[in-house]
Every structure is written in C-alpha cells, then in structure tokens.
Image: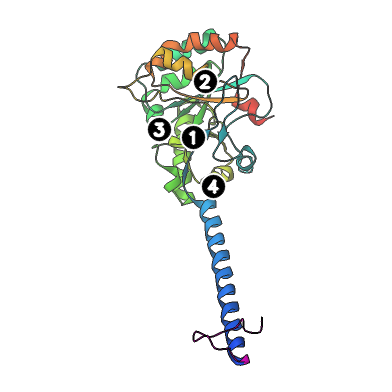
C-alpha cells in the first residue's frame, strides 16, 4: 500500500504531491456535486412550469381507469380534475363547442330524451353565432363552461391580464345572452396547459376540467364510424369518467341516443360537474 501513490513516471509521490492530488480530487468531487444539484434544481423548475398537453395512458379493459400525465392528487391542488375518485359507476358528460354545424340540436335532443345534463365548454365564436342554442342549453338544465374566447394555446400565455381577458370575454358574452353569471368551469383549448395556467384559473375562481375518456371525433372530413365510436366510448368507459366529446361531430349527433342507452344498460348513471366539485 505504501507504493500506491505514484506519479506519471512511476515514482513515489512526496507528501506535498499527495496533498495536492487529494485537494484536486476533492475540488472536482464538490464541483460535480454542485453541478448535479444545479441541474436537478433547473429540471425541477422546468417540470413545474413547462407547457404540456393533457394525455392519458394505461387504458385497460372491463372498466379499468386510465392514468393521466399528472396525478389526480397533484391536479387537485389547483382545483383541477380529470376523473372522479371511487368506484361509483357515474359518467360526467362534457362537450367542447368551437362552432355550430348542425349537430348540437340532435345532441340536445338525445340528452333531453335520456334526462341527462351535460356541460358544454364554449368559445367566443359559438357564443356570437349561436345564442339561441346557448339559451336552449341553459333552459334544458345544461351547464355552459368556459373554453376561452379565441381558443388559443393558453400554455403560451404568461400574463395574468391576457389570461383573464380570454376568460372574462366569454363570461361577459354569456351574461349578455342569458342574463346569468357563468359557472366557473374551465377547459384549456386542446388540453394545452402549464401549472402556472392552472394557478391563474384557480385565482380567478375556476375549476379546471380535463378528461379521462375521449376519441378522435373532431376531423370533419374523417369522422369515425359508428362501430369505431362504440368500440372506444363503450369499451373504455369506467367509473368516474369525465367524457369529452365534440359537438361538431356528425357521428356523435347520430349515435348519442343509442350510446346513452348503452351506457345506461351497463349500469352507469350521469352526474354533473357541479356535483363533482361538491364531493
């Protein structure tokens, strides 16, 4: 062991050389640790504030619940949700309404037939172009939620003033049409969000709702078949589902009556988001 410390010529190092080497190695170790902690700190900050798209995974069979890319516990800190807790066979039915193309009326007809109350997340264009349908939604016991006025990528908005304007412009137009204050339920356009956005919505008194079940129903020139729709929507339904459908979908307008009956036959009932937040 006495010959362990050797210099590059293979000769023994003297005490001064050994101390220099020890000091050098210690400095390098501390520098590495500092860099490691700095990277961890930056990474943690980035994860907290980065923009993200809402996503799901872990879909199973026989009513198994999916996982989200943020846990229910973490979302709940910001009054945000994507699924209900527990195993109660309840469905919370929601529609995103960006514009009207003739499919909202058959959707409302089916909901009325089955005595189901849904939430319609609307944008400014829908409010401007279809005030009579907004009034019908309210009269028939549905909730109208906030989907922003211009449907932007809200995760790119860092200013509270800009965020507030997107939200309040919808509130003001809704009140102009209905004479009522809008219920403070919010859905980020395209599911794009950041934790900072969720905080902003919370500060404005809003509950944010993502979803635990959806399917590709928004392409007008590539609508799913009835069989495809039932495979996804009946096959993947699960207790506590927040279901997202689009009111622009021709398929949804055509199948909703039968779909609601199918879910009822499977033992499900329909809840409202107002009931959800009061749990």
The magenta-colored residue range is 1-15
Crowd rating for badge 4 (residues with CA inside 10 Å; few <14, some 14–19, many 20+): some
Q: Nearer the viewer, residue 167 or 13?
A: 13
Crowd rating for badge 2 (residues with CA inside 10 Å; few <14, some 14–19, many 20+): few
Distance from label 4 to label 1 (Cα)?
A: 23 Å
Q: Residue at x 56, y 65 (%)?
A: 36
Q: Which mark is residue 138?
A: 2
Which residue is denoted by mark 1 in the rendering? 171
Mark 4, secondary structure of its residue: helix
- How many labels sit on residues? 4
Is 12 within the magenta? yes
Which residue is denoted by mark 4 in the rendering? 195
Q: Nearer the viewer, residue 267 or 79?
A: 267
Question: Is disc 2 in contact with disc 1, using a CB cutoff of under 8 Å?
Answer: no
Which residue is denoted by mark 3 in the rendering? 124
Mark 3, secondary structure of its residue: helix
């Amino acid at each position: 062991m006495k010959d362990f410390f050797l210099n590059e010529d293979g000769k023994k190092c003297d005490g001064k050389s050994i101390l220099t080497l020890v000091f050098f190695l210690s400095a390098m170790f501390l520098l590495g640790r500092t860099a490691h902690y700095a990277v961890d700190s930056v990474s943690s900050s980035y994860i907290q504030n980065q923009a993200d798209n809402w996503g799901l995974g872990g879909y199973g069979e026989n009513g198994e619940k999916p996982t989200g890319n943020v846990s229910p516990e973490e979302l709940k800190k910001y009054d945000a949700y994507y699924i209900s807790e527990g195993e109660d066979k309840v469905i919370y039915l929601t529609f995103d309404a960006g514009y009207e193309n003739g499919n909202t009326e058959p959707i409302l007809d089916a909901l009325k037939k089955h005595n189901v109350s849904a939430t319609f997340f609307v944008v400014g264009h829908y409010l401007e172009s279809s005030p009579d349908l907004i009034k019908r939604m309210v009269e028939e016991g549905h909730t109208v939620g906030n989907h922003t006025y211009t449907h932007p990528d809200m995760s790119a908005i860092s200013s509270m003033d800009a965020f507030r304007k997107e939200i309040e412009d919808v509130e003001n137009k809704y009140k102009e049409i209905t004479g009522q204050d809008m219920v403070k339920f919010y859905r980020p356009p395209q599911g794009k969000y950041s934790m900072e956005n969720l905080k902003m919505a919370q500060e404005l008194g809003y509950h944010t709702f993502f979803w635990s079940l959806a399917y590709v129903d928004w392409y007008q020139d590539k609508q799913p078949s009835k069989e495809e729709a039932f495979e996804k929507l009946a096959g993947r339904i699960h207790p506590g589902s927040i279901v997202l459908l689009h009111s622009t979908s021709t398929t949804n307008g055509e199948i909703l009556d039968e779909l609601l009956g199918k879910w009822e036959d499977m033992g499900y009932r329909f809840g409202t988001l107002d009931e959800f937040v009061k749990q």
